[in-house]
Amino acid sequence: TDHHNFVLVNCYFPNGGRGEDRMKFKMAFYEKFQQRTRQMIAEGREVVVVGDVNTTHRSIDIWKEEKPPRHGYLPCEREWMDSFLEDGFVDTFRRLHPDSEHEYSWWDMKSNSRSANKGWRIDYVLMTSGLVSSALHEASIHQGQHGSDHCPVSVCLRSIPPVTCLPKTPLPLSSKKRLETKKK
């Protein structure tokens, strides 16, 4: 959604855990997603990406590194995260809490891992660096909130300076047709 000063993308990224074909699909999705966010950045937009990325980026974000690593912590997935961050995105939680351990957003329900806090941090708020420096105030993981195998993650932003000129990215034709159809 376009919030004038930034674009908010709320996204569920595919899980790669159902075999090789699913992992290929996940990585192809990552690449397409990254192409789109690069386009937004090239247009001068600040971007906020929130959601279940289905990848744990660093060893501090997983209760125990598995050998060999399994989907969600594979080298190719973590390398994609490195690449995404190199494009100008910031992991807001790690920016403000670089050494905070045992902070997870997902737990395996089958093994009742939440009660022992054996989790993974796979839910993120990723922001372009310009917005982080001008607006990021706090980033939190709400582990005490139950109701799912995930818990909420959030950020608090300071007042964002107004934008004087907004570049506009037109909706793809297929989206326009769907919107026009819904209006009728």
Image (cartoon, helix red, strand yellow):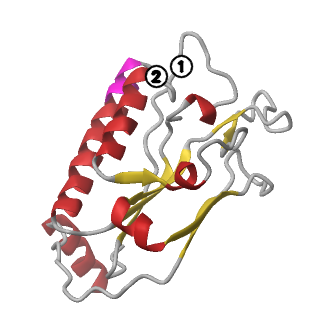
Residue 1 among those drawn in magenta: no
* Residue type, label 1: Arg
Q: Residues within 10 Å of mark 1 (few under 14, many from 20)?
A: few
Residue 76 pos. (x, y %): 37, 24
* Residue type, label 2: Leu
Q: Residues within 10 Å of mark 2 (few under 14, many from 20)?
A: some
The single residue placed furthest to the top in the displayed view is 68
* Residue at 38% in and 18% down: 20
* Residue at 22% in and 53% down: 38
Residue 100 pos. (x, y %): 68, 44
Q: Which residue is under mark 2?
A: 74
Residue 28 pos. (x, y %): 28, 35
* Label 2 – label 1 distance at C-alpha: 6 Å
Residue 115 pos. (x, y %): 86, 37
Residue 181: which numbered mark, if any?
Answer: none
| SS state under label 1 | loop
Q: Nearer the viewer, residue 150 or 99?
A: 99
Look at the numbered discs 2 and 1 and tell me whether their residues touch, using CB distance below 8 Å: yes
Quarter of the image where the C terminus is located: bottom left
Q: Nearer the viewer, residue 149 or 175?
A: 149
Most common secondary structure along the magenta stretch: helix
* Residue at 79% in and 32% down: 113
| SS state under label 2 | loop
Residue 7 falls left or right of residue 38: right
Quarter of the image where the N terminus is located: bottom left
**Residue numbers of the magenta segment:** 20-24
Q: Nearer the viewer, residue 30 or 82?
A: 82
* Residue at 53% in and 35% down: 56
Q: Which residue is under mark 1?
A: 70
Where 70 falls versus 99 (above or below)? Answer: above
User: Based on the displayed image, in which of its 4 quarters is residue 152 positioned?
Assistant: bottom right
Where 152 falls versus 177 (above or below)? Answer: above
